[in-house]
Amino acid sequence: MEKTWNEDNLQSLAEARRTNQILTAVVYGVQTMKLPIHEDGKVVSREVETAIFMLPGGVTAYCPVNEFSDYEYRSLAGFAGTKQQVIIDRLDLDHQIAMVSVKKADELLAQKLWNEMKYLQDNEQLSTKVYDATIVGFNEKNEHIHLKMNGARAFMVRNDWDHGRVRDLGEQFDRGEHVEVKVVRFDEERQMIQVSRKATIDDPFAKLDELAKMDTIAGVIDSVHPIHGIFVKLSNGLVVKGMKPRDLAEPTVGEVVTCKVREINREQRRAKVVIVAYPRGKKKRKDITDFLFS
């Protein structure tokens, strides 16, 4: 892609570098390149994986992997096509090369975030603030979701993803996905921020009373387990225990059902529904041998 180096861009880039201005840029490619990088206080040339950015004004810029993040990624390849916030680290006007740093931009943004969180906590307003965060990873062992929020690292535990029962948590999102979160707790000394997506979502359990007043409600079979039984996802997103009469055929996952709210346990945040019909006409089982002739 052709670089656009003109007088206006030069002035703009120089001003941005001088003031540590944070710019939003797009990663349009990743490749291994020989670039000058800082190493033990010296500038040396190394073959390093490099994110290639398009800056405002059409100028191409380069970010070596050591300036992309403190976190060690296996590869930057997955970041192609994403937007990142950067600061201009160095300008080589003779060779028309702009070097940028995501890591340094993150450090500036993170410090502003820490100051804001402390202010909001001191004024008892932290629980009202909603932040935009980007999912960067998932730890399958402890089921922690790792996020980047205003340049800082944050994490979310399984129970803070949603109000209801969540199956296969790692399949609920993609890396790079943006989610709204609230801060649950933070510790600047430990560089720890715990967030919750659930805290930004209306509790579907609170709407169960409205559904319980109806003669019947619609649901979708979420799972059928030989030990744990049937679970139904209701229209408000809540997954609850499902029961059925003996003469009704066994449901299958994804099947639409008509049901009735039977029980609401607010203390344990559990509910049960009874499946009364299959609105798409599933045949009732009258005899255990029916399946042989269907």
Image (cartoon, helix red, strand yellow):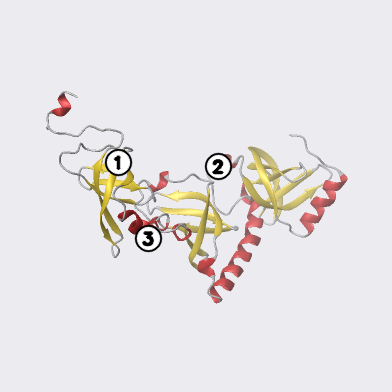
Of circles 1 and 2, the one toward us is: 1
| Residue bearing the label numbered 2 | 75
Residue in view at x 51 percent, y 54 percent: 147
Q: Position of residue 264 (x, y in %)?
A: 27, 59
- Identify the secondary structure beneath mark 1: strand
Quick check: marks 1 and 2 in contact, CB under 8 Å? no
- Sequence order check, earlier mark of 1 and 2: 2
Q: Residue furthest right?
A: 7
- Sequence order check, earlier mark of 1 and 3: 3
Position of 38 compared to 166: left or right? right
Position of 201 compared to 51: left or right? left
Query: Disc 1 and disc 3: Cα gap in Å?
Result: 22 Å
Amino acid type at circle 2 is Ser
| Residue bearing the label numbered 1 | 257
Q: Position of residue 224 (x, y in %)?
A: 26, 42
Front-most of 276 and 32? 276
Front-most of 202 and 279? 279
Q: Residue furthest top?
A: 293
Give the quadrant of the N terminus. Answer: top right
56 above or below 155? above
Give the quadrant of the C terminus. Answer: top left
Front-most of 270 and 188? 270
| Residue bearing the label numbered 3 | 206
- State which quadrant residue 249 falls in: top left
Front-most of 62 and 260? 260
Query: Disc 1 and disc 2: Cα gap in Å?
Result: 45 Å
Amino acid type at circle 1 is Val
